[in-house]
Image (cartoon, rainbow, N blue to C red):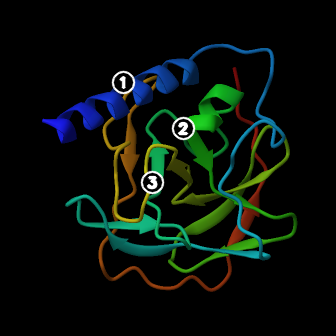
Amino acid sequence: MRKGTGLAATMALASLLLAACGSSSSNPYSTATAQPSAQTSAAVLVKSATAGGLGTVLVDAHGMTLYHLSAEGSHKFICTSSACVSAWHPLLVPAGGKASGVSSLTVLTRPDGSSQVAYKGEPLYTFASDSSPGEANGQGLKDVGTWSVVTITPAAQPSSTPTTTSGGGRYP
């Protein structure tokens, strides 16, 4: 009974946080107020693992499940408000850094000028309600789109040279 109550509380918190993602805000994404998933080295490692019975998914260097938002894509960022990035932490790359580990990784420039790792053009995020590797509590949550784990085929090859592009997306 207690486990079900905890899950319900987590889902209620996630719903409240997601409601803020689609709302307009005069304060665009700011690294000062957000809790982004930035790495401390010049290269950000993305690898594959299994998570929540969803198959092979992408994870960050700490094994935390990576997600994408269906409404986002190359050069289009929806999750930019401080409320959204508090729940969904962009996987950021330090200035001049790169992404490595699996093929099809790129680095996109967010509207605030920071650099975010993308897989096949989709910006990557971790979820605040995932507290340990292998969790996928954000799978299927809906707001201005659907949040989904990034699934891959087990044979993803290491990347050799990631590319950097500039973003021209909109933000609330």
Q: Position of residue 162 (x, y in %)?
A: 67, 74
Q: Quadrant of residue 25?
A: top right
Name the quadrant of the C terminus: top right
Can residue 77 be spotted in the picture? no
Pointer 1 or 3: first along the chain: 1
The residue that label 3 is drawn on is 131
Q: Amino acid at mark 3?
A: Ser
The residue that label 1 is drawn on is 12
Q: Amino acid at mark 1?
A: Ala
Pointer 2 or 3: first along the chain: 2
Of residues 80 and 131, the one drawn nearer to the viewer in this rendering: 131
User: Residues under labels 2 and 3: Cα distance?
Assistant: 24 Å
Q: Amino acid at mark 2?
A: Glu
x 51%, y 26%: residue = 17
Question: Viewed as shown, does residue 35 lie left or right of 147?
Answer: right
Q: How many marks?
A: 3
